[in-house]
Image: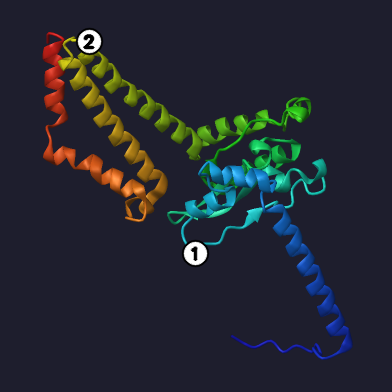
Amino acid sequence: MQRLVSSIDVRSEEFLERKRNYLKLRDEFGDILKKNTRGGYPEAVKKHHARGKFLARKRVDLLLDPNTFFPELSPRAAMGQYRDRFPSAGLVTGIGVIHGREAVVVANDATVKGGAYVAETIKKHLRAQEIAPENRLPCVYLVDSGGVFLPEETGVFPDRFDFGRIFYNQARFSAMGIPRISVAFKLAGMATKIGHARNTPDKTCRMKDQGMDYTGEAAMSKLYCFCIAGEVVDEAVQIHGGYGLMKDYAIERLYRDRRLPEIGEETSEILQLVISRKIGC
């Protein structure tokens, strides 16, 4: 590569003055970015950690491939508004690499008013959604939001490009064949399955305590819990990707524990046979 020769005198007073001004502005801009990407109030951050949850930018970092660049979009959104109670408008958006593929990432910051939306949050969300169809990029949503910020509710619904536009875009993306993944909805479905699976052994135990024939119910309970465990660990590994099968993560142990019974214990077909005989088939 040919070396470019500059005629700038880096020792001149003019150059040194401009350098000082540039470094000053750079530091000021860095302080602004740091302030706007810190999350909500310290009390909210502390409560967030107490619940065992990661901050929004940490969640994004764990989602993306290691050592890849994440250009965050609009980090200064809502700056100077709402008495600075909505840093970055309570939303993290950008383009990241997930399993070697670029994707639009949208993550709610629950430390900022519970991840609630104000007008600037909606605009930031919609701008991120504009990138997906133009570049045929999938969208990944790390949802942790309380919905619309109630004091601003009357001003975020009426216009064409307000809150409802987010869901309109989802329908458009579906028609265009653009993948959309909402991690929170997947987790909600997993939690529902686990919660229901926990109830089935309780019913079996009550029947046993009451002296009732619980053979069929026990087989149903074991089969159902066995199947649900498989579905949930598969989805958990899908969320974590390759990291899910590393021993550093608890999901690796759960995944292994779920697979071992398929080898060492009776198969699901035997349980199905017990159930079918119990119901008179």
Viewer-side residue, 228 vs 111: 111
Secondary structure of residue under mark 1? loop
Query: Which residue was labeled with disc 1?
Result: 67
Q: Taking 91 as reference, is 65 left or right?
A: left
Report the residue at 57% width, 58% height from top.
Answer: 70
The picture quadrant where one finds residue 194 is: top left
Instruction: Give whichever of 45, 196 is nearer the camera.
Output: 45
Q: Is residue 124 visible?
A: yes
Q: Where residue 55 sits: x, y (%)?
A: 57, 48
Q: Would you say 101 lies left or right of 151 here?
A: left
Q: Residue visible at 53% across and 49% down?
A: 59
Q: Which residue type does callout 1 highlight? A: Asn
The residue identified by callout 2 is: 210
Which class describes the residues within 10 Å of circle 1: few (<14), some (14-19), or many (20+)?
Answer: few
Q: Residue at x 29, y 34 (%)?
A: 229
Comparing 124 with 111, the one in front is: 111
The amino acid on which the numbered mark 2 sits, given as a three-letter code, is: Gln
SS label for mark 2: loop
